[in-house]
Image (cartoon, rainbow, N blue to C red):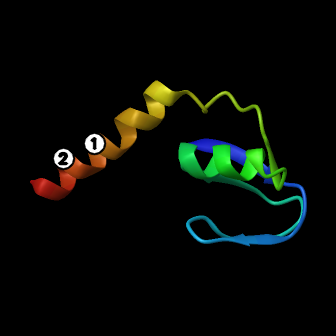
């Protein structure tokens, strides 16, 4: 998961509706697409490490299976 900031208002099929200036965590794939289309920019946060993001969903999946 990456944190992005919307540069203008838009709607994205996978990430939903964004208001101008809104900051939100989205999947890496959605973030890359939105930044590539110049609809958003990356926001530097201390919690945006790929390793940490990969661990969180696995923990939730394990908890759901138990």
**SS for tag 2?**
helix
Closer to us: 4 or 13: 13
Q: Quadrant of the C terminus?
A: bottom left
Vertical placement of residue 66 versus 47, above or below: below
Q: Are marks 1 and 2 in contact (CB under 8 Å)?
A: yes
- Closer to the camera in the image, 41 or 61: 41
Considering the numbered disc 1 on the image, is that residue within a helix, a strand or a loop? Answer: helix
Residue 19 percent across, percent down from the top left: 83, 70
Q: Could you say which is closer to the camera, residue 14 or residue 25?
A: 14
Residue at point 40%, 35% (across, down): 54
Q: Residue at horizontal 89%, vertical 58%?
A: 21
Say which quarter of the image contains residue 47: top right
Q: Is residue 17 visible?
A: no
Kindly identify the residue that appears in the image at 75 percent across and 45 percent down: 36
**Residue underneath mark 1:** 59
Say whether residue 66 is visible.
Answer: yes
Q: Is residue 50 above or below residue 29?
A: above
Please give left or right for residue 4 compared with residue 26 in the image: right
Q: Residue drawn 61% across and 32% down?
A: 48
Residue 50, image x, y percentages: 50, 29
Q: Mark number for residue 62?
A: 2
Q: Is residue 54 left or right of residue 62?
A: right
Residue neighbourhood size for the residue with mark 1, other residues' Cα within 10 Å, grouped as few (<14), some (14–19), many (≥20): few
């Amino acid at each position: 998961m990456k944190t992005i900031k919307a540069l203008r208002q838009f709607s994205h099929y996978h990430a939903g509706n964004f208001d101008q200036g809104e900051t939100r965590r989205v999947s890496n794939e959605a973030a890359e697409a939105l930044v590539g289309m110049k609809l958003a920019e990356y926001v530097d946060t201390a919690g945006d490490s790929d390793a940490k993001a990969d661990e969180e969903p696995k923990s939730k999946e394990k908890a759901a299976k138990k």
